[in-house]
Amino acid sequence: MLNFWLESNIITKKVSTDTNIFKKYIDNFNWDELLSKVITTTILLLLVSLLFYIFHYIGKKIIKRAFKKNRLVESLSSGRINTAYTLSQNIFHYFILFFYFYAVLSLLGIPIGSLIAGAGIMGVAIGLGAQGFVTDVVTGFFILLEQQFTVGDDVKIGTISGKVAAFGLRTTQILDYDGTLHYIPNRSITIVSNLSRNDMRAQIDIHVKPNQDFDKIKTAIQNVNKSLTPKFDDITKKPQILGVVETPNGLVYRVIIFTKNGAQAPVQRAFLAKYLEALKQAGLEMPISPINLSAK
């Protein structure tokens, strides 16, 4: 019982001593200095943020104006200018962001020099974490250098098809034909099918019977081609009549029309309608499911 009383007394004195030390520390703490430092640091952070925001805004305006002037130069490709523009905006954004965080950390009293000196210790971990980013940047650089595609091109990357909406350091944005915007990491781009570098082929196959008058069919199609071709500026080569072709589905009368990229579907529809109308007026009977369209 005596031992218990002695231990309780010792514990009570120790708690009382610790409480007095903590109270003494609180009483002697310079709260005015702390409050003044917090207010000063907050004001400096706001001023720095405002300053970098102004730099960021003005810098992007300057880049936009510079590329706007370059668009007036006819010798430069519009898609190439748009690609360089989005990439320049991307690089400038990361440049400003890096120095902004550097300034914020300095104002907060975090020793940047020590962090940089200690980077060797965490180099392996950071290297592994940044490996994907570095691969994205390097791959993006070679895509730009080799001019695999530019902003505005219609491309197929893997299973994704659409128009290149933007090209950045890390990702490429593809606007799908259904309106979906895909963000593709540059390191994932291995095979690119660019659909905008060459003319597109619109192929029209009209199924015919073996006993039909093929000369009459050819004449009707030639008349349509002669009257309709001048109405489409997107046709790059005159329609080519290949004539009768044997396919797994039977005999077809094939016509090929080369157009600019994106114009193949409207041209197909317009010529198909006129072909059917001309063949009907010529008194030619078409078999069931007479039409086969394809565009490449």
Image: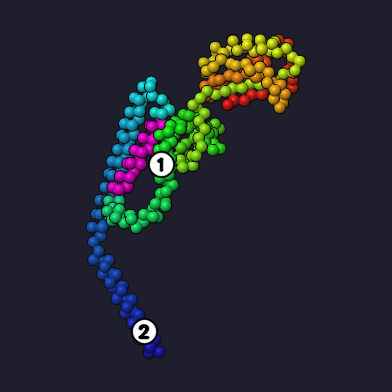
Say which amino acid is labelled 1: Val
The span picked out in magenta is 82-104
**Crowdedness of circle 2 by 10 Å Cα count: few (<14), some, many (20+)?**
few
Q: Position of residue 272 (x, y in %)?
A: 64, 18
- Residue 91 on the magenta span: yes
| Left or right: residue 82 compared with residue 233 | left
First along the sequence among labels 2 and 1: 2
Q: Residue furthest bottom?
A: 2
Q: Residue at x 25, y 66 (%)?
A: 27
The residue lying toward the viewer, choosing from 53 and 254, is 254
Q: Amino acid at mark 2?
A: Glu
In front: mark 2 or mark 1?
1
The front one of 240 and 282 is 240
- Identify the residue position indicated by label 2 in the image: 7
Q: Please tell me how crowded label 1 is: few (under 14), some (14-19), or many (20+) other residues with Cα within 10 Å.
A: some
In this orientation, does residue 180 appear?
no
Label 1 belongs to which residue? 138
